[in-house]
Amino acid sequence: MKKMKNAIVLGGGGFIGGHLSKRLINEGYHVRIADLKNHEYFDHSEICHEFIKCDLTDPKAVELVISQECDEVYQLAADMGGAGYIFTGNNDANVMHGSAMINLNVAHECVKKKVKKVFYSSSACMYPDHNQLDADNPNCEESSAYPANPDSEYGWEKLFSERLFLAYNRNYNLEVRIARFHNIFGPQGTWSGGKEKAPAAMCRKAAETNSGGGIEVWGDGLQTRSFLYVSECVEAVLRLMDSQFTGPVNIGSEEMVTINQLAEMAIAISGKNINICNLGGQDFIDKYGFNCPTGVRGRNSDNRLYREKIGWEVSLPLKEGMIKTFTWINEQLAKKSK
């Protein structure tokens, strides 16, 4: 009889972690989740066998969570959010301290407990700001990471932690896999409150707004991004884990759109007649009290290395993922209004 594999998902109470945990359960793993919070949208019985609520910045908590000779640890726990949280600068110290502490604790404990393989979720935010000034031609090829110049402290911490896990790989033979996520979105994630990502924000605004109204888009809306649906992300992570490639490697979509185009897509899905209201400069400062946090001018995943090393590529069009996400957020709004 085949032995059941053990997986520990750190940050499994979050968006990507919850989807990943559910997939691992369906693949026949024994899954333990550790997080500061319960999952807001998944029942724990759907996504894990054990849920440990704890603060992973505490080394004693990590010592408790990571078991001896565990097959796979997925480290997704981090202090993060959307542009309004990451790019204002108001949360930099907490973002850097909390996430770095978690990664230091996890790397150390995985060596101590002889964990067989560790996945670390980095971010496209670690790419140099100077490679992302042209909205139409951003350079996010993996080899472009140095000389380093991330556009946020969140990105600097991600870059540090990549190097941390690679150092543990070199010095202690810890088998690691590292991926740089590019804007993962979908249902069962944050969709309001300031920490939501752009696809969820646009879907919520379109769902909330009546025909004849307008939705606000920060900046001129001409900044470019690509967005990857969460099931595609999970598939890419598991294929990377099954490969012999350490990384770092991009996991994202190459379907680049402007933020205005993303808003237009959400509006079209809603079936309403809604205008886009771009807000920036002094008008934005007057309304919110801080500079408009739009991030880099252009960012798009470069998937050539992933295709070469793993032999697989994402395929779900952005619009299909947006339809799924809009439908789910619309349902959440309907529940709240009851």
Image (cartoon, rainbow, N blue to C red):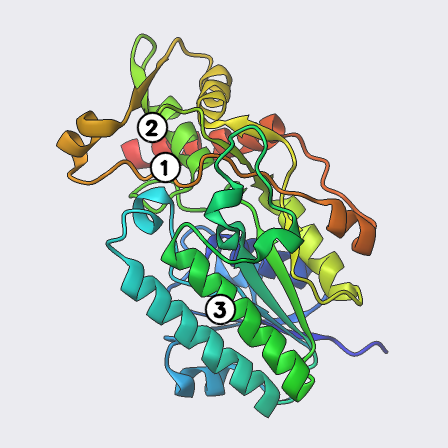
> Which residue is label 3 attached to?
160
Pointers 3 and 2 in contact (C-beta within 8 Å): no
Pointers 2 and 1 in contact (C-beta within 8 Å): yes
In the structure shown, which secondary structural element does the residue marked by tag 2 occupy? Answer: loop
On the rendered structure, is 12 left or right of 272? right
Give the residue displayed 55% in from the left and 27% down from the top.
257
Q: In this view, does 296 lie above or below 115?
A: above
| Image disc number at residue 294 | 1
Pick whichever of labels 2 and 1 is earlier in the sequence: 2
Where does residue 93 sit, x and y in percent of width and height? 28, 65
Q: Which of 310 and 290 is in front in this view?
A: 290
Disc 3/disc 1 C-alpha distance (Å): 23 Å
Q: Name the quarter where the N terminus is drawn.
A: bottom right
Disc 3/disc 2 C-alpha distance (Å): 30 Å
Q: Is residue 174 above or below residue 250?
A: below
**Classed neighbour count for the residue bearing mark 2: other residues with Cα under 10 Å, few (<14), some (14–19), many (≥20):** many
Give the residue displayed 48% in from the left and 44% down from the top.
130
On the rendered structure, is 67 left or right of 209? right
Disc 2/disc 1 C-alpha distance (Å): 6 Å
| Image disc number at residue 219 | 2
Query: Is residue 262 at least partly visible in the picture?
Result: yes
Pick whichever of labels 3 and 1 is earlier in the sequence: 3
Q: Nearer the viewer, residue 139 or 218?
A: 139
What amino acid is found at the position of numbered circle 3 in the picture?
Phe
Pointers 3 and 1 in contact (C-beta within 8 Å): no
